Image (cartoon, helix red, strand yellow):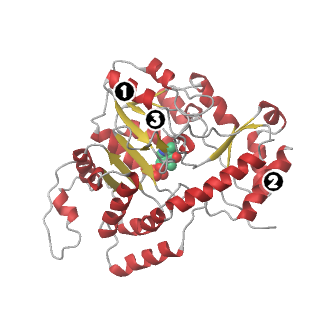
Amino acid sequence: MSEFIVFGRPAVGRDEIDEVIATLESGWLGAGPRVVRFEEQFADFKGVPPDQVAAVSSCSAALHLSLLAAGIGPGDEVITTPLTFCATANAILHAGATPVLADVDPLTLNIDPAAIERKLTPKTRAILPVHLAGLPCDMNSILTTAREHDLVVIEDCAHAIETQYQGRGAGTIGDYGAFSFYPSKNITTGEGGMVVARNSECIQRIKIKSHNGLSSDAWKRFADAGHNHYLVTDCGYKYNMTDLQAAIGIHQLRRIDANWERRRNIWQDYQARLAHLPVQHPAGAGEGDRHGLHLYSMLLSDDVIRDLPRDTLMARLQARGVGSGVHYLALPEHPYYQQNLNWSPEDTPVATAAGRRTLSIPLSADLRPEEVDRIIDVLCSELA
Ligand SMILES: *Cc1c(COP(=O)(O)O)cnc(C)c1O
């Protein structure tokens, strides 16, 4: 049998490998010149000044630091989507605040602005939308609500590095944007993340917080020989990115547009050649917007699921060499939130139904044409 097609396989080239080796040989493995270079390149890609970005260890850290920089803490409520990775809600809990779920739109599967309005209370301090799969949220409505109620907007851009909404890059529309470079994301640094903030003083605070609270002149002198006294100015976290990670990211960013084009070809193949299947295909971006094309997630119809439960289908695909994913089971399906926040799947019925029917098939830029053919053939024969 041909090789197993892993879901979310990263596209890593020779340049990344050579840069990692060069980093090891340079003797500087921690946060240093390559992190600075990666930040500059990322800022350039997003069209923001370099003092408005901070490279960190993950998107989870980026979300946590954004919430802290926004002054959100105990007693505050943050409205977010139930159809996301757990890190989105966990970051709110780590900040000491309370996550409040607003259900999603049944077509876009992004947070529904009307549902946000219904969840506002005097304690609401922020909205944390997720551009699911790379499809931009309805940011105009979200910003209008935020302005009316003086709320901070933090965009979870884990799927949305390339996403554009009405000419603006995802993560630069609200007050903060949090990005992920986990191996399965659109670009990777092994593990890693980035914060983009409109306010460069917030970025300065975030950088200090990500280096255990050390004053910036301490960790900035990475190239100096000799001893420097450092001063602790905040009770921070160990959330910084390292040069080993940035070495990978520098070359990933150089191929970001070419990889997006490759995923667009695969996406168009799926749309054309899977059109006849009894599924709801993913929504496309609106006029003038750009989809980040992170996930190709379909909703299986009730007719399919009656005879072939989603998880059985996944097992069959797996047996035939095709990895797949679920993005996501709605957060209230998980025991931690049921037990500690009293959430129940019925509270967000649209997200719950979508989470039980959704199936993501591989969309990596690394897929070879014959692998795309095989994914399509296997899926068509299982769902025929
Ligand atoms: C992957 C992901 C995260 C967390 O990213 P890490 O870099 O792994 O911490 C957060 N939100 C969403 C929507 C994600 O998919």
Left/right of residue 8 with respect to residue 75 in the rendered view: right
Indicate whether 318 appears above or below 104.
Answer: below
Residue 59 image position (x, y, % from top left): 43, 49
Q: Earlier in the sequence, mark 2 or mark 1?
A: 1
Mark 3, residue position: 129
The image quarter in which residue 374 lies = bottom right
Residue most extreme to the bottom: 25
Amino acid identity at mark 2: Val
Mark 3 Cβ inside 8 Å of ligand 1: no
Q: Marks 1 and 2: in contact by CB < 8 Å? A: no
Is the Cβ of the residue at disc 3 closer than 8 Å to that at disc 1?
no
User: Which x, y percent locates residue 188?
Assistant: 49, 60
Type of amino acid under label 3? Pro
What is the CA distance from the residue labelled 2 to the residue labelled 3?
34 Å
Q: Amino acid at mark 1?
A: Ala
Q: Which residue is mark 2?
A: 378
Q: CA distance from mark 3 to mark 1?
A: 12 Å
Q: Within 10 Å of the Cα at label 1, are there few (<14), some (14-19), or many (20+) other Cα atoms?
A: some
Q: Which mark is residue 181?
A: none
SS for callout 2 = helix
Quadrant assignment, res 117: top left
Q: Which residue was labeled with disc 1?
A: 146
Residue 101 position within the rendered picture, expressed as x and y whole percent measured from the top left: 49, 27
Query: Image height check: is 145 above or below 328?
Result: above
SS at mark 3? loop
Position of the C terminus by quadrant: top right
| In the image, residue 52 above or below residue 254 | above
* Residue ID at (31%, 45%): 197
